[in-house]
Amino acid sequence: MAISVFAVTALAYWDEQRESAAALDDFAQEQATLAASVASGLASRLATEPDAPVQNLLAGARRLERPNALVVLVAPPAGGLVASDGRPVEAPALAEAIRAGRSTVRLSRSAAAPLGLPERTALAGISHAEARDGSWGVAVVASAERERDRERWARARLVLAALVAAGLVVGFGGYALRRQRAKLELERELAVAEVERERDARLARLSRAATMLTLASGVAHEISTPLGVISGRAEQLLERAGEDERARRAAQAILEQAQRVKDVIQGLLDLARGGGPALQEVAPRSVVDAAVALVAHRFEKAGVRLAARVPDDLAPVRCDPTLLEHALVNLLLNACDACARGGAVEVTAALERGSLTFAVEDDGEGIAQVNAARAAEPFFTTKPRGRGTGLGLAVVSEIAKCHRGSFSIEPGSPRGTRARIRLPVAEGAP
């Protein structure tokens, strides 16, 4: 903006100088016209009264003169300059211009004072009158005081306009800078507030995670005793079953599931304490089949169809089978709860871009995008009170991370929900 103001001011100053020079040239031409008129009259008088004194010859020209503004001078053939009243005048610059035959000349302040004009620039128009004794020079000299005053006031107005424009630019620029600074400060405050909010949320999540770890440790400790009782009673039932195959299978199932509960709890505790899973190469189909077998009765009771689609030739995956089965069980149970009677759930496994992807899709009521973004947060749930703890998907996410994989959940198309666990395939697998 400052450059624009400077450019406009410079352009205006140049234009004012050009106009001033043009005005002075026009003023000089006016004096030249007057000088030509006086010279014409002088020539007529010289033709009839060649010996008349100068004051008589210029009697008519004296009516043009104005005190402190305009004077008429002649230069006789004999030399020198004479005023209209007959007195000699010293004006070397004007005499030189007359001898040189110029039509106009500009006189300085010092040259204008001896002519009875103010000490300001003066302009002279020059002409010549021919007589029998030679050529008479005629000069009409006028002060350019008014033109110079107009020029000075025009320059003052220009400077004032430039100062006003600069003031406006500075004022508006300062106002804009203050607004911009206030905006930047507000954005910084909002950014700081957002960082603080995210930090507080992270601390809250860490606090909930610590609480969950403490709670899980306490629950594991409390469950270990009843699990021991259940296992002991199951072993007694197994011994007493004798040849009753149905009773033996029931007792064996109780023992296996009790041991599974113990293994899952121990695995989750190890993860919560920062340990790693016990990895081994496992066929994806076996993991899916084990998870489906564990939840089949829940699907039958809810009236929801469950289908598994896993190719037999998939590359093995390095995982903790118990933890991965537990993650799939959580996803399947969530999908079952989301479906109405007559709904359908499908679990698949496939190789996608170098990762093995386990997907669980349902045709239930679906999940909102805003809830999908928070689904893996501990204690976040959209289920009614008493039907969900908000820990299932958080556990799934942690299990995927500890296997160097990822977990995602999103709305299905056109309805339902799609949950995925992506894990790296075993090294050297095709």
Image (cartoon, rainbow, N blue to C red):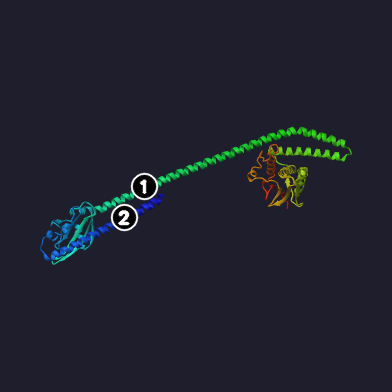
Q: Position of residue 70 (x, y in %)?
A: 20, 55
Identify the image quadrant of residue 202: top right
Q: Position of residue 323 (x, y in %)?
A: 73, 42
Question: Which residue occupies the extreme right position in the image?
Answer: 243
Q: Position of residue 173 (x, y in %)?
A: 42, 46
Q: Who comes first in sequence, dot 2 or dot 1?
A: 2
Identify the image quadrant of residue 271: top right
Question: Which residue occupies the extreme bottom position in the image?
Answer: 132
Query: Is there any visible trace of residue 186 in the rendered image?
Result: yes
**Badge 1 density bin: few <14, some 14–19, many ≥20, Cα 10 Å:** few
Identify the image quadrant of residue 328: top right
Question: Which residue occupies the extreme front position in the image?
Answer: 341
Mark 2–mark 1 Cα distance, whole angstroms, equals: 20 Å
Q: Nearer the viewer, residue 186 or 429?
A: 186
The answer to whether residue 256 is left or right of residue 393 is right
Circle 2 is placed at which residue position? 17
Q: Amino acid at mark 2?
A: Gln
Q: Is residue 273 above or below residue 6?
A: above
> Residue 164 bears which disc, if any?
1
Query: Is there any visible trace of residue 283 in the rendered image?
Result: no
Q: Amino acid at mark 1?
A: Val
> Residue 53 bears which disc, if any?
none
